[in-house]
Image (spheres, rainbow, N blue to C red):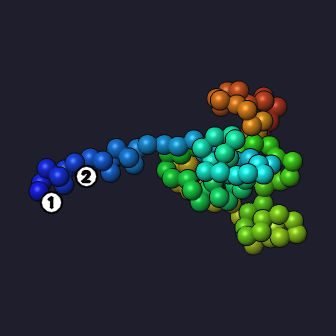
Protein backbone atom coordinates (compact mmCIF):
# COMPACT_ATOMS: atom_id res chain seq x y z
CA UNK A 1 0.00 0.00 0.00
CA UNK A 2 1.51 3.35 -0.99
CA UNK A 3 1.00 6.55 1.01
CA UNK A 4 -1.77 7.86 -1.30
CA UNK A 5 -3.79 4.70 -0.87
CA UNK A 6 -3.39 4.92 2.90
CA UNK A 7 -4.66 8.50 2.93
CA UNK A 8 -7.68 7.55 0.82
CA UNK A 9 -8.56 4.71 3.19
CA UNK A 10 -8.34 7.02 6.19
CA UNK A 11 -10.52 9.58 4.45
CA UNK A 12 -13.17 6.95 3.73
CA UNK A 13 -13.20 5.79 7.36
CA UNK A 14 -13.56 9.38 8.58
CA UNK A 15 -16.41 10.21 6.20
CA UNK A 16 -18.28 6.96 6.85
CA UNK A 17 -18.03 7.44 10.61
CA UNK A 18 -19.88 10.77 10.31
CA UNK A 19 -22.83 9.25 8.46
CA UNK A 20 -25.98 8.76 10.49
CA UNK A 21 -28.97 6.49 10.09
CA UNK A 22 -32.64 6.82 10.90
CA UNK A 23 -33.71 3.55 12.58
CA UNK A 24 -37.38 2.62 13.01
CA UNK A 25 -38.97 0.36 15.66
CA UNK A 26 -42.53 -0.96 15.47
CA UNK A 27 -43.40 -3.59 18.07
CA UNK A 28 -46.50 -4.52 16.06
CA UNK A 29 -44.54 -5.27 12.87
CA UNK A 30 -45.24 -8.91 11.97
CA UNK A 31 -42.54 -8.92 9.24
CA UNK A 32 -39.62 -7.01 10.77
CA UNK A 33 -36.79 -5.99 8.52
CA UNK A 34 -33.61 -3.91 8.71
CA UNK A 35 -35.13 -0.90 10.50
CA UNK A 36 -34.65 1.41 7.52
CA UNK A 37 -38.29 2.55 7.28
CA UNK A 38 -41.64 2.12 9.01
CA UNK A 39 -42.62 -0.85 6.79
CA UNK A 40 -39.24 -2.54 7.46
CA UNK A 41 -38.98 -1.48 11.11
CA UNK A 42 -37.36 -3.63 13.75
CA UNK A 43 -39.99 -5.29 15.95
CA UNK A 44 -37.80 -5.02 19.06
CA UNK A 45 -36.15 -2.02 20.64
CA UNK A 46 -33.27 -4.30 21.73
CA UNK A 47 -32.54 -5.11 18.07
CA UNK A 48 -32.51 -1.43 17.10
CA UNK A 49 -30.22 -0.50 20.00
CA UNK A 50 -27.82 -3.31 19.08
CA UNK A 51 -27.75 -2.09 15.45
CA UNK A 52 -27.35 1.63 16.23
CA UNK A 53 -24.07 3.52 15.90
CA UNK A 54 -23.08 7.00 17.17
CA UNK A 55 -25.04 9.78 15.42
CA UNK A 56 -27.94 7.44 14.62
CA UNK A 57 -31.51 8.30 15.61
CA UNK A 58 -34.09 5.71 16.67
CA UNK A 59 -37.80 6.40 16.27
CA UNK A 60 -40.10 4.14 18.29
CA UNK A 61 -43.75 3.60 17.38
CA UNK A 62 -46.37 3.34 20.09
CA UNK A 63 -47.10 -0.39 20.06
CA UNK A 64 -50.10 -2.34 21.32
CA UNK A 65 -47.82 -3.93 23.95
CA UNK A 66 -44.97 -2.38 25.97
CA UNK A 67 -41.37 -2.81 24.90
CA UNK A 68 -39.45 -5.09 27.28
CA UNK A 69 -35.66 -5.53 27.35
CA UNK A 70 -33.79 -8.82 27.30
CA UNK A 71 -34.12 -12.23 25.67
CA UNK A 72 -37.69 -13.37 25.04
CA UNK A 73 -38.60 -9.82 25.96
CA UNK A 74 -42.32 -10.09 26.50
CA UNK A 75 -44.32 -11.18 29.50
CA UNK A 76 -43.82 -13.61 31.05
CA UNK A 77 -40.28 -13.67 29.55
CA UNK A 78 -39.53 -10.06 30.49
CA UNK A 79 -37.21 -9.87 33.47
CA UNK A 80 -36.17 -7.12 35.86
CA UNK A 81 -32.56 -8.23 35.45
CA UNK A 82 -32.45 -6.55 32.01
CA UNK A 83 -32.64 -2.93 30.95
CA UNK A 84 -32.37 -0.94 27.76
CA UNK A 85 -28.98 0.70 27.17
CA UNK A 86 -28.86 3.54 24.68
CA UNK A 87 -25.38 3.63 23.08
CA UNK A 88 -23.40 6.87 23.38
CA UNK A 89 -24.26 9.34 20.62
CA UNK A 90 -27.58 7.67 19.74
CA UNK A 91 -30.81 9.67 20.02
CA UNK A 92 -34.00 7.82 20.97
CA UNK A 93 -37.47 9.27 20.35
CA UNK A 94 -40.82 7.65 21.09
CA UNK A 95 -44.49 8.39 20.65
CA UNK A 96 -44.68 7.89 16.89
CA UNK A 97 -47.81 6.62 15.15
CA UNK A 98 -45.71 4.80 12.54
CA UNK A 99 -46.48 7.01 9.54
CA UNK A 100 -44.38 10.12 10.26
CA UNK A 101 -41.71 11.39 7.91
CA UNK A 102 -40.43 14.01 10.35
CA UNK A 103 -39.96 14.25 14.10
CA UNK A 104 -42.30 17.24 14.24
CA UNK A 105 -45.16 15.13 12.84
CA UNK A 106 -45.44 13.09 16.05
CA UNK A 107 -48.72 13.46 17.92
CA UNK A 108 -48.25 16.28 20.44
CA UNK A 109 -49.79 14.38 23.35
CA UNK A 110 -47.17 11.62 23.21
CA UNK A 111 -44.15 11.84 25.54
CA UNK A 112 -40.68 11.08 24.27
CA UNK A 113 -37.19 10.50 25.60
CA UNK A 114 -33.97 11.85 24.23
**Residue depicted at 19% across the width and 54% down the height:** 6
Residue at the spot of label 2: 9
Q: CA distance from mark 2 to mark 1?
A: 10 Å
> Badge 1: few (under 14), some or many (20 or more) residues near its Cα, within 10 Å?
few
**Residue depicted at 61% across the width and 51% down the height:** 34
* Image position, residue 73 (x, y; %): 78, 65
Q: Decide if residue 21 is in sight here.
A: yes
Residue at the spot of label 1: 1
* Image position, residue 48 (x, y; %): 63, 54
* Image position, residue 46 (x, y; %): 67, 59
Q: Decide if residue 113 is in sight here.
A: no
Residue 100 - label: none
As displayed, is residue 16 above or below residue 47? above
**Residue depicted at 55% across the width and 53% down the height:** 52
Mark 2 and mark 1 lie on one chain; the one further toward the N terminus is: 1
> Badge 2: few (under 14), some or many (20 or more) residues near its Cα, within 10 Å?
few
Q: Are marks 2 and 1 in contact (CB under 8 Å)?
A: yes
Q: Secondary structure at mark 2?
A: helix
**Residue depicted at 34% across the width and 44% down the height:** 15
Q: Is residue 34 left or right of residue 79?
A: left
Q: Quadrant of residue 84?
A: bottom right
Amino acid sequence: MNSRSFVLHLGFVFVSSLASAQIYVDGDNMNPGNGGSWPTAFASLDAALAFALPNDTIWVKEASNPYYPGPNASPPGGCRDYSFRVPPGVALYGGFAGTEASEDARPEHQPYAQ
